[in-house]
Image: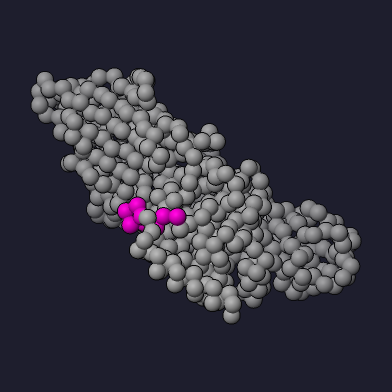
Amino acid sequence: MTRHFFFLLAVFLFMSRLGESQTINNLPQNYFANPLDINLRLSGTFGELRSNHFHSGLDIKTNQRTGAKVYATASGYVSRIKIERYGYGKALYITHPNGYTSVYAHLEKFSPRIEKYLKKKQYENEAYTIQLFPTDLELRVDQSEVVAYSGNSGGSGGPHLHFEIRDSAARPINPLIMGIEIPDTKRPLVKQIKAYPLNETSTVNGKNKAKLLRLIPLKDGKFKVEAFRAYGEIGIGVNTSDRQNGANNQNGAFHIETFFNGSKNFEITFDRYAFNESRHINQMIDYEHFKNTKSRISRLYIPNGSPLSLYQDNINKGVLQLYDKDTTHSYSIKIEDFKKNQVEINMNIKNDPAPDSIPFPNDEKLTFINHNLTYHQKNGPYSLMIPKGALYESVFLDIEQNTDTLKVHSDIVPLHKNMIISYDISSKQNDNIKQYYIGRVTSWGAVYHVNTRRKGNILSAATRTLGTYAISKDDVPPTIKPVNFKNKQWITKNTSLKLKLTDEDTGVDAYRATVNGKFILTEYDYKTGVLTHDFADGVVTDTENELQVIATDNVGNSTTFEATFYRKS
């Protein structure tokens, strides 16, 4: 009752002071506290360019360790707990009285009362992966209350805390705007500048081909770019990153604006976006350049059809119209981080005359795909469907089939929606057709499993990656080996039970562990292949225990491991 009273009192006091709080663009300031009690250093910033998405929060370093106390950034209630093997791993969502939600991801574990709530639900459902939505009365928290401990779960590449703030429409918003303080006196970095002809009649230095331009560093955070010639509709791109104090990580920029002949013609600010916009990053960057070099060049113009709300003021979508003969234009780029540290890039562009003729590539062996129409093709046992809107623009693709292999161009053209590849395996009826799957073939010849469905004799897979695909077979079941115990061993001093669970071909799909026929909760770390049961759960109470673990791979091959262990109760 007392806790309930103080929570309601905090809500009332906040609402009464809401009109008095300082704001940036009507956003509350000094409301959210730091989620860690250490000096915050970042390995990732909001809006940073990642594979197929913008980064939706801050990645806060935890000194390469797990187990740091994670604090509720403001009072509220736990509105969601999501546990998954990949992605965010162990994640906690707290909804606050002002309508915002804070998110804490890649956690190691939760505070005792939240952990107790979670474990109860996991055992009731007999499942590790779970998603829960507590009511506003079940798990209330106060500001600066310990709610979890930092970890490395899910798709994390190393120990850290992923921290987000989302608005009432569930859009991620830059926590720096909300008052989370990160020391930063370093200017952004500039690595590459590229000029793009944007249609068939445009040229850069006389060619209808994009060109990297030479950067020349000057003093005071400025650069100039080698002068170049251009004609027609031209776009400019920049490869830039930012750094904060106390870390050498190259993170994302906050604000970029460009000026053409002294007038602003393009602006982008990484402050807030909707999750359904995020994959349009592949349209914003030079995707082919990224796939070939692993470096991301941001286009400083708005591609046709892009819905990104990150874009702000622009003239002609940031596209340069260069048609005046013998005219020289000035173009500048200003890149700024949240703390107003800035770099400036200046260049001169001289108008070329219109080209007499431009040689066009020989596309006779390529297939034209209109991005506004659905494309269907059947070739031998394969069929391919690229739905309307899957491509950002109409393109020529190299599509060819050879026995059990289908080539759909290469991964230098982005897909926004899944294409569907199907294969008729009637010719393999004398074999175990359940073990066949569609896999993506790498440039070095390895085949990676793509989630494959089978209906009768038809295999089908949905994928948003162009490339070469092949029919492959997996007839090898997973392997299970004990790590910290042996069969018929006393393990009273063990705090956990660990097994190595791996599948070299299609990967582990499902697993289940029991002791004396009773379900026990196990956590699988796909990065290490270790399956762990924590004896602190208190479900293993007998002296003699019969362990059984069943694991299944992604085509249904199964392995059963059995062992006996002893513990003093």
350 w.r.t. 165: above or below: above
Residue 375 shows up from this direction: no
Report which quarter residue 402 is drawn in. top left
Residue at 88% in and 65% down: 566
Q: Is residue 28 magenta?
A: yes
* Quarter the C terminus occupies: bottom right
Closer-to-camera residue (121/185): 185
Percent x, y of residue 139: 57, 72
Q: State left or right for residue 142 relative to residue 322.
A: right
Magenta run includes residue 8: no
The residue positioned 73% from the left and 62% from the top of the image is: 533
Give the colour scheme shown. one colour
Residue drawn where x is 76% and y is 74% of the image: 517
- Determine the residue located farthest toward the left in the rendered image: 325
Nearer the observer, 115 or 156: 115
Q: Nearer the viewer, residue 402 or 192?
A: 192
In the picture provided, is 99 more to the left or to the right than 139?
Answer: left
Quadrant showing the N terminus: bottom right
Residue 168 is situated, as x and y percent measured from the top left of the image, at: 38, 64
Q: Which residues are magenta?
A: 23-30
Residue 256 vertical placement versus 305 (above, below):
above
Q: Does 22 sit above or below residue 262?
A: below
Residue 392 spot, x, y in % from top left: 29, 48
Q: Please tell me how many numbered marks the rendered image carries.
A: 0
Which residue appears at 63% of the width and 42% of the height?
63
